[in-house]
Image (cartoon, grey):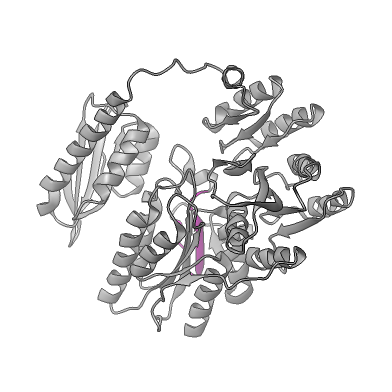
Amino acid sequence: MTRSTADTDFDHVECRPGAYADSVALLQVSKDVAAVDGVRAAQVAMATPLNLDVIASMGFDLPETSPNDMVVALRLESESHLDSALAAVDAALVAVTRRTESAGSVEEPPRTIASAIKRSEAAMGLVSVPGANAVVEAMDALDAGHDVMVFSDNVPVAQEIALKQVAAERDLLVMGPDCGTAMVDGVGLGFANTVQPGPVGLVAASGTGCQQLMCLLDHAGVGMTAALGVGGRDLSVDVGAMATRQAMRRLDADPATELIVVVSKPPAAQVASELRDFAKTLGTPVHFALLGAGQPDLTASAEEILQTLGRPVPQWPTWGASAATVSPGRLRGLFAGGTLCDEAMIMATDQLGPVHSNIPLDPQYALDSTLTADGTVMIDFGDDTMTAGRPHPMIDPTIRLEYLARTAADPATSAVLMDVVLGHGADADPAATTAPAIRAAIAAARDDGRELAVLVACVGTASDPQVLDDQAAALADAGAEVFLSNARAAGRAISLIGATA
């Protein structure tokens, strides 16, 4: 199935009956093909209902398929690139098949998380299964007498409460659900940055908020004893900070922790107040980095932490520069991290007015399924509703970069704010796909007679596998203005929009 979608776009979709590769292998195939010259977008996936939804959402027309079929969807600059793109698909499929075959025989995996913990003598379990099944696995770990980190999202809040009540009765810790970041005994879990050891113990109801603080403090020469994620709903009225209290007790008992830092998306006011009272019962000082209207942003919190520890506040690094003059228009925020999106929305609301979002600060500004609105728009592509059945945008940027191309072509857009989060678990080279997309977006706007500013918060460290300087330099070379601090990036974007108003 082929069709032209625009003057310079050519779509090709084909069904390959009976072909099979696992989802991780096909994700790599899609990324390899997307990097081929002349390919604007590529999605190679098994024809499951969820995958078909993703392909359809990218604007492709779908052929008749069954779940046993493989679908190859390609968007090309022109039909002349079709042969080379299909050759790239075949080569990538052969490559992943060879890698799978060379892996050789493996030990039969354990059938339950409790048996896995017993086999490895691990201190805790990590659950990463679809949310509907997570509570069974997490309870299995608790029944085995171990802490558990629940990476899974889309877990009903009633199940989260039940898990944490059981954990509290047994003096155990439930990290999550939707706990994407942690560091325990120096080992990063989920999306985790490589930071030096040090005196700060983090309790995080916020994955990317935790990563932002870790990276800022690491840049300032301050390390961590641990980072205990508790899930983004823990400081809600329903959950009542059950895991946060338990995590604070754990860090208070650790003599290496000189300062406990609690970081969260905007919490329930009642829960935050009760938590501040609880902190007074601990022997270790506690610093609260709780986002909200009138509260310090995460960079300001990092600076307060440094001052508390008697450490100097450094200059936060930047790379590159965006267009000196920006065309009048709107700000669009395209985030992989929910807390970074929240932080930018709080700052933008204060200076630009209400922000439309799929995770709005005010429900009346919730976006519909088109994810478009007149005014300032900020989208969290890592939200539960966006990742059901799909890889997180820190792993697979396809959906976000598709949106970047569309929003850059909109004459109403004059500035785009993004985050690129590095570390273990994240894309091994996010700049390889994001930088070309940014370069294309800026070029498309210029072809239309406009200047488009792209501001990027690159959250990472020099010790991360991707190397902060390398990634930031590649993004800057594509035309973006890059910041280690998300608040600095948001402030710059807001000032550019304000200057054109």
State whether residue 472 appears in this view. Answer: yes
Q: Tell me which residue sits at (28%, 69%) in the image.
A: 444
Q: Tell me which residue sits at (29%, 65%) in the image.
A: 440
From the top left corner, tell me how far across and down residue 352 is, in percent.
57, 75
Which is nearer the eye, 429 or 465? Answer: 465
The vertical placement of 493 against 231, above or below, is below
Q: In the image, is 119 to the left or to the right of 88? A: right
Which is nearer the eye, 151 or 216? Answer: 216
Outermost residue toward the right?
Answer: 281
From the top left corner, tell me how far across and down residue 175 is, in percent.
66, 38
Q: Tell me which residue sits at (39%, 66%) in the image.
A: 473
From the top left corner, tell me how far across and down residue 62 is, in percent.
26, 40
Quadrant that contains the N terminus: top left
Q: In the image, is 263 to the left or to the right of 369? A: right
Name the image quarter holding residue 242. Answer: top right
Name the image quarter holding residue 477. Answer: bottom left
State whether residue 63 appears in this view. Answer: no
Q: Tell me which residue sits at (42%, 81%) in the image.
A: 328
Which is nearer the eye, 410 or 41? Answer: 41
Q: Which residues are magenta?
A: 371-382
Q: In the image, is 25 to the left or to the right of 168? A: left
Q: How many marks?
A: 0
The vertical placement of 501 against 421, above or below, is below
The vertical placement of 147 against 55, above or below, is above
From the top left corner, tell me how far across and down residue 100 is, in percent.
30, 27
Q: In the image, is 309 to the left or to the right of 232? A: right
